[in-house]
Amino acid sequence: MTPVLNNLVHNQSSHCESGVVSNMLSTNGFNISEPMAFGISSAMSFAYLPFVKVAGMPLIAYRMPPKTIINTVTKKLGITLHREKFSSADKGMAKLDEVLAEGKVVGLQTSVYWLPYFPDEMRFHFNAHNLMVYGIDANDHYQISDPVFEHTVTCPKRDLEKARFSKGALAPKGLMYWVDNVPKEVDLTPHIYSGIKKTAKMMAGLPVPGINLFGTQGMEKLAKDIERLDRKPKKCRHLFLAHIVRMQEEIGTGGAGFRFMFASFLDEAANYTNNQAMFEASQMATEIGDNWRNLASLAVNHCRSKTPVPLSDIAAQLRDCAKQETELRARLLAIK
């Protein structure tokens, strides 16, 4: 294999998809921070879906579905995004080599489990991890910019192939993407305002009777289910609460992390637009992130302490997060 090494901007990020978007566009000459990409794509949300299982437990999401950020940002900025999936692993790897040889960096959807540079304790079956490939050496080791790592890493071809074509929920099917026609400069002002308004509208959940799984409605339903755990055996209570903590704090940055990133977006947006109301909203979003982190601490305390925190206290903490997000929503909708 002829070695290839393309130019790259690699910055460690909080979340894989927003990090890839920021690094990919910056590599192509359009500098955009990770929080700005997250904010203008209206990625912050909440969903509690008991009928969708992750390792046998309900799906709890704190952001919009995978690919929302890359698709929304490129559409808003007028960037051409090429995407391909493959039924054949051989064709998928050959296409990756072809695009790398054209001098481009390539985004991939992968499974964390098959990436050997992840520590063993962090490798689990999650099929929506994003990274960028920017080269390949003579030994068929790919040069990778994984935004959750401080430095670039390498991965043998056989492992990257497994990661791209893993099976199960959200199977990547070899998805690869790259960009063309990246603008050098764009006025972000209208995208900032539209991103804030859309985020605010989604924070209340869906305006459809009987569907209470999203936004603050979903938080209230989860709080009720936490209270109902007192009817369950101790093992079931601990599994459910530990799952909440894992979904919130480990998978995809989590509830607190996304609130902190949204706060950073509002702070950067306030400077960009000289809007004091955005800065004040950023302070509130930071406080909300702190409260989500407190929720995780209470859940861990319930599982580990000899004198566990009552389930009613954990549910009350979640309702407090919902109340704060309702207040933030009103403040965001009032921004002019």
Image (cartoon, helix red, strand yellow):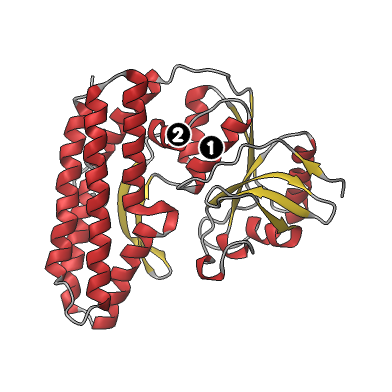
Q: Considering the image in quadrants, where does the C terminus appear?
A: top left
Q: Name the residue under label 2.
A: 37
Alpha carbon distance from label 1 to label 2:
7 Å
Compared to residue 136, the image places residue 239 above or below, namely below
Residue type pointed to by label 1: Val
What type is the residue that disc 2 sits on? Answer: Ala
Residue 316 lies, in percent from the top left, at: 13, 59
How many dots with numbers? 2
Position in image of residue 170 (x %, y %):
52, 55
Q: Nearer the viewer, residue 212 or 5?
A: 5
Question: In x, y percent, where is residue 272?
Answer: 37, 21
Q: Position of residue 154 (x, y in %)?
A: 69, 55
Which residue is denoted by mark 1 in the rendering? 21
Tell whether label 2 touches label 1 (CB within 8 Å): yes
* Camera-nearest residue between 310 and 154: 154
Q: Residues within 10 Å of mark 1 (few under 14, many from 20)?
A: many
Give left or right: position of 59 versus 95: left
Callout 2 environment at 10 Å: few (<14), some (14 to 19), or many (20+)?
Answer: many
